C-alpha cells in the first residue's frame, strides 16, 4: 500500500520558495497585494445565523448535532474532546518556536521539490498569481531529520510533542469520523474497507500542517491563506487566540470562526463530501491576517488509507438519489487536486462535468496541494 508521503511524492509540487523575512517588511510588496478581497459579502458577526456550531462531545446528541453542522455549514467546533489543553498549548508553542527561528535556520529544513515534509510556502501558492502572507511546515511521517536541522540540541523533545499530538489527534479524528458516519446512518459494518475500529485507526492516513501568519503592514490587501477546501475526510484545526480563519457559507458569505480556548475546529473535506454523496459539504475556507498579532495554527489532515476507493456510500444512493461522484482513492484525488485545485470535486462529479475538465484519470502530472 502506498503511504501518504509516497502518494504526495507521486504528485510533486512546484512552488517557488522565495522566502521573505516577513518581519523586515514595512510595506506590503506588490507581489503580496490582493486587490479584490471580497469582504462586502461578510455578514454581520454576532447574528445567530453567523455562528459556527460549537458541539460538546459529551452531549448524548453529539452525532445528530454534528450531522446537522456538516450539512448546513461543513464546519463545527468541538469542546470536551478529551485532548488535554496542555498538549494543545505544547503544539502551539512548538509552531511558535519553529517559525520564530531566524530565516537561515528555517531554510535548513526547506521542503525539497519532490518532498512533502518540511518548511515552505503554502502548497496552494502555485494556483494564485499573488503570494500569501504565511509560512508553513508540513509533517508526514517522522519529523526527525528536519528537526535535527532546526534544533541540533533540542530536537528530541519537539519530536516527542509531535508524536504525542499525532497519537491524540488520530484517536479524536477516528472518533469524529465515526460520529459523522453514524449521523448518516452508516455503521462500521457498512464500511467494508474499515475492518475493526483498531485496524482502521492503524491504517488511516494523516498529515500535520503547522501554519504561521505574521503581523502584516497592510492586512486589508493581504491574504494569509487563499480560499480552498481540504482533500481530506476531515481536518482538525487548533488555532491560537488570534482570529483569521473564515469559512464560506452559502447565502451569507465569509464568516469568521472565532478562536475558542481549548476548542478545536473541524472541517469536512472533499473525500467525506464524496462519501456522503454531497450531503455533507466540503467547506471553502481562507485565512486573513492582522496588523499587530502573529497567528499560529496546526491543521491535522485526516483521511482513509491512501489506496482505498472512496465513493458515495451505497446507503445514500438509490433510484431517487443517484451517486453524484465516481470513486477515487486519496492517492488519485491528490493528483486530481493538483491539476484542478478548487474544481477537483467537480472533476470527479458524475452529473455536472465542467467544460475543459478532461482526462481526470491522468493524475501523475503537475503540481499538488496538501489539504
Ligand atoms: O490556519 C488556519 O486557520 C487554516 C489552515 C488551513 O486551512 C490548512 O492548513 O489547510
Ligand atoms: Fe485548509
Image: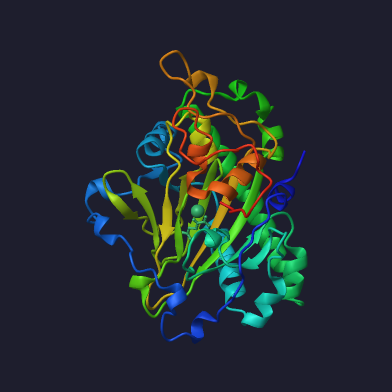
Q: How many marks?
A: 0
Q: Is residue 241 above or below residue 367?
A: below
In the image, residue 345 above or below residue 141: above
The residue closer to the viewer here, 108 or 352, is 352
Viewer can see residue 45? no
Q: Position of residue 182 (x, y in %)?
A: 50, 28
Would you say 183 lies left or right of 360 here? left
Could you say where residue 73 lies in the image, as x and y percent from the top left?
Answer: 37, 42
Q: Quadrant of the N terminus?
A: top right
Point 40% across, 69% down: residue: 289
Residue lying farthest to the top in this orientation: 319
Q: Quadrant of residue 97?
A: bottom right
Q: Position of residue 25 (x, y in %)?
A: 47, 85
Residue at point 61%, 41% (across, down): 333
Residue 180 x/y as whole percent: 49, 34
Q: What is the basis of the colouring in this image?
A: rainbow
Q: Quadrant of residue 189?
A: top right
Residue occupying the far front of the picture: 356
Residue 91 versus residue 294: which sits nearer the camera? 294
| Residue 266 in view in this figure | yes
Q: Is residue 177 above or below residue 123?
A: above
| Residue at 38 percent of width and 35 percent of height | 71
Q: Eyeballing the image, is 145 above or below 52?
A: below
- Specify the quadrant of the image occupied by residue 12: bottom right
Horizontal side of residue 361 vs 156, given as left or right? left
| Residue 357 vs residue 56, the one in the foreground | 357
Amino acid at each position: 500500500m502506498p503511504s501518504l508521503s509516497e502518494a504526495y511524492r507521486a504528485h510533486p509540487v512546484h512552488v517557488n520558495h522565495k522566502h521573505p523575512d516577513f518581519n523586515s517588511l514595512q510595506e506590503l510588496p506588490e507581489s503580496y497585494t490582493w486587490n479584490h478581497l471580497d469582504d462586502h459579502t461578510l455578514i454581520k458577526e454576532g447574528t445567530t445565523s453567523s455562528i459556527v456550531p460549537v458541539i460538546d462531545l459529551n452531549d448524548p446528541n453529539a452525532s445528530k448535532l454534528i450531522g446537522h453542522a456538516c450539512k448546513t455549514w461543513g464546519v463545527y467546533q468541538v469542546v470536551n474532546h478529551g485532548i488535554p489543553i496542555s498538549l494543545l498549548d505544547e503544539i502551539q508553542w512548538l509552531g511558535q518556536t519553529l517559525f520564530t527561528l531566524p530565516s537561515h535556520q528555517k531554510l535548513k529544513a526547506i521542503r525539497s521539490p519532490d518532498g512533502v515534509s518540511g518548511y515552505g510556502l503554502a502548497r496552494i501558492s502555485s494556483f494564485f498569481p499573488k503570494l500569501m502572507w504565511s509560512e508553513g511546515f508540513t509533517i508526514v511521517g517522522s519529523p526527525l531529520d528536519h528537526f535535527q536541522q532546526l534544533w541540533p540540541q533540542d530536537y528530541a523533545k519537539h519530536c516527542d510533542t509531535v508524536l504525542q499530538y499525532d497519537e491524540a489527534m488520530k484517536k479524536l479524528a477516528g472518533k469524529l469520523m465515526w460520529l459523522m458516519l453514524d449521523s448518516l446512518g452508516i455503521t462500521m459494518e457498512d464500511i467494508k474497507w474499515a475492518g475493526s475500529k483498531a485496524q482502521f485507526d492503524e491504517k488511516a492516513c494523516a498529515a500535520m500542517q503547522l501554519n504561521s501568519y505574521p503581523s502584516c503592514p497592510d492586512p486589508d490587501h493581504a491574504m494569509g491563506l487563499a480560499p480552498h477546501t481540504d482533500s481530506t475526510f476531515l481536518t482538525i484545526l487548533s488555532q491560537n487566540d488570534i482570529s483569521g480563519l473564515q469559512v464560506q457559507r452559502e447565502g451569507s458569505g465569509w464568516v469568521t470562526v472565532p478562536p475558542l480556548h481549548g476548542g478545536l475546529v473541524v472541517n469536512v473535506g472533499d473525500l467525506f463530501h464524496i462519501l456522503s454523496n454531497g450531503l455533507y459539504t466540503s467547506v471553502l475556507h481562507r485565512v486573513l491576517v492582522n496588523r499587530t498579532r502573529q497567528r499560529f495554527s496546526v491543521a491535522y489532515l485526516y483521511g482513509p488509507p491512501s489506496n482505498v476507493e472512496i465513493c458515495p456510500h451505497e446507503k445514500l444512493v438509490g433510484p431517487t438519489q443517484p451517486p453524484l461522484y465516481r470513486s477515487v482513492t486519496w492517492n488519485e484525488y491528490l493528483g486530481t487536486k493538483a491539476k484542478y485545485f478548487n474544481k477537483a470535486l467537480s472533476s470527479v462529479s458524475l452529473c455536472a462535468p465542467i467544460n475543459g475538465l478532461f482526462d481526470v484519470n491522468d493524475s501523475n502530472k503537475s503540481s499538488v496541494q496538501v489539504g
